[in-house]
């Protein structure tokens, strides 16, 4: 794990040389992560040995989502019956004057159930789908006016819908459910050196050839080992296009079956033998080019970024982001922030770089060799809109791996800022440059638009604070991000602190653009997304006194379509964490799978702290699936007790931080389902708000009771830092009332007094 402590390289005094000496450095790394792996090669002389990604699967529908689709199917079938019967009656009696639409007449003459539309509305609300597919304003008002009576609210909403309006809403609902059902995710984990099973091969092919329209029967046959000729005969087609697709799919199967070479590649490296090279990349995007695994992977030529395809997609994303903001706010955004990450840049060949170019109105100019020489500004008349300022936030890997792009972007941004012949109303880069000069910033500071960690530093530390629980106010997470990322880079600057300039640009930012590049990992799967995109949005929102939206562009999709962050988070939680198919596949992996579930619960809390993503249905279903389900809880606790402890702890913390308003019946069940597992493992966690602790202490002092919280006042300094406070306790002892979190504890209830109680204090 030397990559976390490397502070310099390229010299015998650097940590790689000091730690490694003459030892070989054999580094197993995922084939889909060439950006981080290249650091190991460049800074630690690593001989990389790649391993495959887990197999893919479709998310499908479950529970509430299945209920919604079932009701929609029933509604559609009933209306088709009504329309069919109406047509038959009109054909049989053409002379009869047309009557009013028989919305309440069924095909057999019986009235239609008046509650079917209401049942759809009720199911939509229960599943939390109304956030992604909002009801019309008059319908929502009718629902809200009905109060807390769920049945009455659903009936009122159905009555407020017009017939055509409800049919349109039902159509959009069907489309959304179809998208959810077809979403791909990684099913479980990959085992080093293990060839995929038939079912896993089917999943890989389904993901890799989704756009090729290969028949499902053909995919199934290939996964079972059939030849191209046999599959062609089965399909009854001699199409040349189909033959080529089948050949490509068959080659992919053959290469996937060579996963065993991951072990042989590692053994060759350990034996000092040559390990064959291969490009790293995304299996779905790059196909057979990244197979077989067990190879010493490499990346790409940074001087050819962005590629033509990446340029077209990035420019489209920039234009759609600008137009979306203009449609919502009635004006052009002055600044848009965009995250530039090394892994995404390698996988997409520079789509995020193209987004930045699109914002300011620039395009690459290439040499005869195809290498990018510079970025030229597009004339305003040709651009047809103002230049939008681009705040570029770089990951540490992008900063170090793409220094040439950093300098080219800095040059283009500087020329945009210094375009004296362009009015500031049409050039927001220049507008902010002049404003910064007026605020007595120097020339270099006023031109700064590219920010990252200080040279040699990596990460925002926001995820570390969330993991440890060492934050009291949401604002602290944004402040932490800003303090770690306030260092400007460019042709002349190599990490100069420019906190004031960064705040100035964030205070004018209309939104943030984050690109995702993988089916295997999304926003909810790893900590870095909320620790950077989430915390950056938090800081922008705090500076502007309003919620700033983040937009997510999924680069694995054929269509470029920026989507709002909350919508993407809901989609991911429905298809992964809350999906029984995903949960079962992950928990079946044992300790590693339990750890992955635990990580996602921490990320859920992180999104809540940074962007205030606090939707009760996500927490409700998480508690029900992983803790209140006795069999699931047992398996998690047995395979990885620490992971289970974290899952339970995050639920308790979310409730205490007002990120989860758990319903009363769930709270009642949680007394055993949440508290008892922790106590049986010898610990207890208490989350206390500072005001509640002060109130409790004042009451205790007034009453001069001997049962007031022991040592809490003396330990307030430790609590303020979020560290646990162990309290020695014995069976039959007591703990005084601590703001509704513990209550009075008495022994003799079948569970021993926990050996320790951890208190965490926050606002």
Image: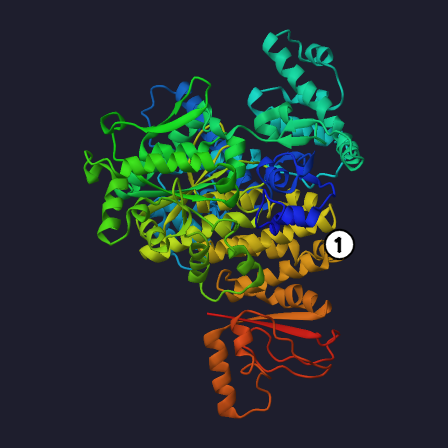
Q: Nearer the viewer, residue 428 or 296?
A: 296
Quadrant in which residue 183 is drawn: top right
The reply to whether residue 760 is visible in this rendering is yes
x and y, in percent, of residue 81 in the image: 49, 29
Residue corresponding to mark 1: 639
| CA neighbours of label 1 inside 10 A, class few (<14), some (14 to 19), many (20+) | some
Q: Quadrant of residue 483?
A: bottom left
Against 139, residue 207 (above or below) is above
Whether residue 101 is visible? no
Name which residue lies at 67% across and 50% down: 18
Write the residue at 43% across / 38% down. 406
Seen as rendered, the residue at the extreme bottom is: 704
Which residue is located at x 50 percent, y 64 percent? 471
Q: Nearer the viewer, residue 349 or 540?
A: 349
The image's colour scheme reads rainbow
Is 633 positioned to the left or the right of 478 in the image?
A: right
Q: Is residue 510 left or right of residue 398?
A: left
> What is the residue that sits farthest to the front in this orientation?
12
Q: Nearer the viewer, residue 374 or 234?
A: 374
In this view of the protein, which residue sits in the foreground, 719 or 374?
Answer: 374
Query: x and y percent of residue 542 in the render?
Result: 36, 58
- Horizontal and vertical percent for residue 735? 63, 81
Secondary structure category for the residue under label 1: helix
């Amino acid at each position: 794990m030397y990559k976390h402590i490397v502070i310099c390289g390229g010299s015998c005094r650097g940590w790689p040389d000091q730690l490694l000496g003459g030892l070989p450095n054999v580094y197993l790394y995922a084939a889909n992560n060439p950006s981080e792996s290249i650091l190991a090669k460049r800074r630690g002389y690593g001989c990389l040995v790649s391993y495959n990604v887990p197999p893919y699967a479709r998310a499908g529908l479950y529970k509430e989502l299945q209920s919604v689709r079932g009701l929609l199917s029933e509604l559609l079938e009933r209306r088709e019956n009504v329309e069919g019967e109406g047509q038959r009656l009109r054909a049989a009696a053409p002379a009869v004057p047309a009557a009013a639409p028989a919305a309440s007449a069924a095909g057999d003459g019986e009235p239609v159930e008046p509650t079917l539309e209401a049942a759809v509305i009720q199911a939509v609300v229960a599943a939390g789908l109304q956030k992604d597919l909002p009801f019309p304003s008059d319908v929502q008002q009718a629902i809200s006016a009905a109060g807390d009576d769920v049945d009455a609210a659903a009936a009122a909403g159905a009555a407020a819908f017009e017939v055509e309006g409800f049919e349109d809403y039902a159509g959009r609902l069907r489309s959304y459910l179809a998208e959810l059902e077809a979403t791909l995710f990684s099913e479980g984990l990959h085992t080093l050196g293990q060839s995929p099973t038939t079912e896993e091969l089917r999943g890989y092919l389904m993901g890799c050839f989704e756009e090729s329209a290969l028949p499902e029967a053909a995919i199934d046959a290939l996964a079972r080992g059939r030849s191209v000729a046999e599959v062609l005969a089965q399909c009854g087609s001699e199409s040349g296009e189909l033959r080529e697709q089948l050949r490509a799919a068959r080659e992919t199967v053959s290469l996937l079956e060579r996963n065993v070479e991951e072990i042989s590649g590692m053994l060759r490296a350990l034996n000092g033998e040559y390990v064959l090279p291969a490009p790293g990349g995304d299996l779905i995007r790059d196909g057979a080019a990244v197979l077989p695994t067990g190879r010493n992977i490499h990346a790409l030529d940074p001087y050819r970024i962005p590629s033509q395809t990446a340029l077209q997609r990035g420019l489209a994303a920039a234009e759609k982001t600008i137009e979306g903001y203009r449609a919502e706010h009635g004006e052009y955004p002055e600044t848009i922030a965009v995250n530039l990450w090394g892994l995404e840049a390698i996988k997409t060949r520079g789509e995020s770089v193209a987004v930045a170019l699109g914002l300011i109105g620039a395009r690459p100019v290439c040499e005869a060799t195809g290498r990018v020489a510079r970025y030229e500004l597009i004339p305003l008349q040709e651009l047809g809109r103002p230049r939008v300022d681009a705040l570029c936030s770089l990951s540490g890997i992008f900063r170090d791996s793409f220094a040439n792009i950093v300098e080219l972007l800095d040059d283009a941004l500087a020329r945009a800022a210094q375009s004296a012949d362009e009015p500031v109303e049409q050039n927001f880069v220049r507008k902010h440059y002049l404003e910064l000069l007026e605020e007595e910033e120097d020339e270099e500071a006023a031109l700064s638009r590219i920010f990252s960690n200080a040279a040699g530093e990596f990460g925002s530390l926001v995820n570390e604070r969330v993991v440890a629980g060492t934050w009291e106010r949401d604002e602290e997470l944004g402040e932490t991000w800003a303090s770690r990322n306030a260092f400007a880079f460019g042709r002349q600057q190599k990490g100069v602190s420019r906190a004031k300039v960064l705040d100035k640009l964030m205070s004018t930012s209309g939104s943030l653009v984050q690109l995702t590049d993988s089916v295997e990992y999304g926003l909810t799967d790893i900590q870095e997304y909320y620790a950077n995109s989430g915390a950056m949005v938090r800081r922008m929102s705090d500076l502007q006194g309003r919620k700033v939206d983040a937009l997510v562009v999924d680069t694995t999709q054929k269509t470029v379509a920026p989507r709002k962050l909350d919508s993407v988070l809901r989609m991911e939680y429905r298809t992964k964490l809350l999906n029984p198919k995903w949960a079962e596949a992950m928990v079946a992996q044992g300790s590693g799978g339990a750890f992955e579930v635990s990580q996602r619960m921490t990320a859920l809390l992180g999104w809540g702290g940074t962007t205030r993503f606090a939707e009760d249905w996500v927490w409700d279903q998480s508690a029900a699936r992983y803790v209140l389900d006795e069999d699931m809880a047992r398996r998690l606790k047995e395979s990885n007790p620490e992971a289970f402890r974290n899952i339970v702890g995050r639920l308790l913390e979310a409730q205490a931080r007002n990120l989860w308003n758990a319903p009363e019946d769930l709270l009642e069940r949680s007394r055993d389902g949440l508290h008892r597992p922790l106590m049986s493992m010898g610990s207890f966690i208490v989350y206390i708000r500072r005001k509640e602790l002060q109130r409790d202490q004042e009451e205790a002092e007034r009453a001069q009771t001997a049962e007031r919280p022991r040592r809490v006042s003396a330990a307030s300094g430790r609590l303020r830092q979020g560290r646990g406070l162990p309290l020695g306790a014995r069976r039959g002892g007591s703990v005084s009332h601590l703001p509704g979190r513990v209550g009075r504890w008495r022994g003799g209830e079948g569970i021993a007094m926990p050996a320790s109680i951890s208190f965490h204090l926050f606002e």
